[in-house]
Amino acid sequence: MKIPKALVILVLAAVLVGGGLWGYRLLRSGEEATTYSQKVIVERGTIVAALAPTGEVYAPRQAELSFDVTKILLTELNVTPGQQVKAGEVLARIDATSLERTVIQAEAQLTIAQSDLEEAQELYTELDLTQAQVAVAQAEVDLAEAQEA
């Protein structure tokens, strides 16, 4: 016996609609089960609200400080992580001897570089001028001797 296609489609549609309604009813009954009710006698009084937030506190102005302690000796540390500080407060001190030595070396290198620059900008020195004058005088003497001969 052959079952018509329309009948198969109608039965499938009925099963799907029925299953959907059954699932919806199960979900609705689960929601109702989680609601609780409590009876309280109403009295006149003060309402108190408490707030207990969770999360992180964000500071609008913050800075990370780090010192390269492999090269510079940290001699004093006056704060701990998270401590509140005020403007102008000394947070830490370092041994500045190596930094001062570096500044002196840089100043010496600057002086040498300025001297080299001045030399490079002057095409001829006083010694070059004197040597040229001697050469001209020698050439004049040689010319006079050649003319006499």
Image (cartoon, rainbow, N blue to C red):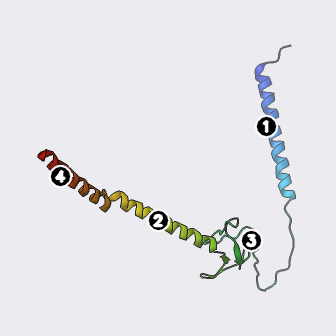
CB atoms of marks 3 and 4 within 8 Å: no
- Secondary structure category for the residue under label 1: helix
Q: Nearer the viewer, residue 64 or 102?
A: 102
26 up-or-down from 77: above or below: above
> Which residue sits furthest top?
1
Label 3 or label 2, whichever comes before in sequence order = 3
User: Which is closer to the viewer, label 3 or label 4?
Assistant: 4
- Secondary structure category for the residue under label 3: loop
Percent from the top left, x then y, of residue 97? 63, 74
Residue under the image location 27 percent in, 60 percent down: 130
Query: Gap in Å between the C-alphas at discs 3 and 2?
Result: 60 Å
Residue kind at label 1, given as amino acid type: Val
> Which residue sits furthest left?
148
Does 53 sit left or right of 145 as displayed?
A: right
User: Which is closer to the viewer, label 3 or label 2?
Assistant: 2
Which quarter of the picture shows residue 116? bottom left
Query: Gap in Å between the C-alphas at discs 1 and 3?
Result: 45 Å
Per the rendering, the mark at residue 110 is 2
- Secondary structure category for the residue under label 4: helix
User: Which is closer to the viewer, label 4 or label 2?
Assistant: 4
Q: Nearer the viewer, residue 46 or 68?
A: 68
Residue kind at label 3, given as amino acid type: Pro
> What residue is pinned by disc 1?
17
> What residue is pinned by disc 4?
140
Which quarter of the picture shows residue 11? top right
Query: Gap in Å between the C-alphas at discs 3 and 4?
Result: 103 Å
- Within 10 Å of the Cα at label 1, are there few (<14), some (14-19), or many (20+) other Cα atoms? few
User: Which is closer to the viewer, label 1 or label 4?
Assistant: 4
> What residue is pinned by disc 3?
53
